[in-house]
Image (cartoon, grey):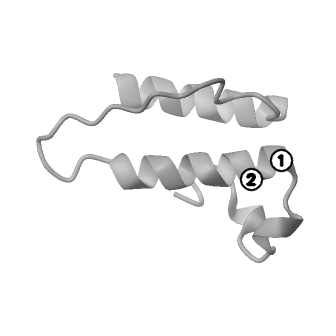
Amino acid sequence: MVLLFAISKFKDRNFLSLSGGEKQQVHFAHIVAQIIPQDDQLKIILLDEPLNFLDPISIIINESLKRDFIA
């Protein structure tokens, strides 16, 4: 997940030192890691403004991942 979400730069930092957008990226990776299908059960995520406070590069990465998971 660290490489997939391009959050490797945060792995050695204290979570409290991350900016709001950086924390949001870490949380999103955490959520996706928890719902990746490990069986045939359908998993659904409801997100309320998931891209707020993210920098443009992170938005592009997350949009790409969203397309991959929907497809």
| Percent x, y of residue 7 | 69, 57
User: Is residue 68 in view?
Assistant: yes
Residue receiving disc 2: 23
Where 65 falls versus 18 (above or below)?
Answer: above
Say which residue appears at 64% left-offset and 30% top-offset.
Answer: 50
Say which residue appears at 39% left-offset and 31% top-offset.
Answer: 69
Query: In the visual, does 23 lie left or right of 18?
Result: left
Which part of the image, by quadrant, shows the C terminus?
top left
Q: Secondary structure at mark 1?
A: helix
User: Distance from label 2 to label 1 (Cα)?
Assistant: 5 Å
Say which residue appears at 61% left-offset and 33% top-offset.
Answer: 62
Q: Amino acid at mark 2?
A: Lys
| Percent x, y of residue 61 | 65, 35
Q: Are marks 2 and 1 in contact (CB under 8 Å)?
A: yes
Q: Residues within 10 Å of mark 1 (few under 14, many from 20)?
A: few
Q: Secondary structure at mark 2?
A: helix
The part of the image, by quadrant, that contains residue 17 is bottom right
Total labels drawn: 2
Residue receiving disc 1: 20
3 vs 66, nearest the viewer: 66
Say which residue appears at 76% left-offset and 65% top-offset.
Answer: 10
Q: Amino acid at mark 1?
A: Gly
Q: Residues within 10 Å of mark 2 (few under 14, many from 20)?
A: some
Query: In the visual, does 67 lie left or right of 25?
Result: left
Where 17 falls versus 42 (above or below)?
Answer: below
Q: Which mark is residue 62?
A: none
The part of the image, by quadrant, that contains residue 33 is bottom left
Query: In the visual, does 16 lie left or right of 30?
Result: right
User: Is residue 4 in view?
Assistant: no
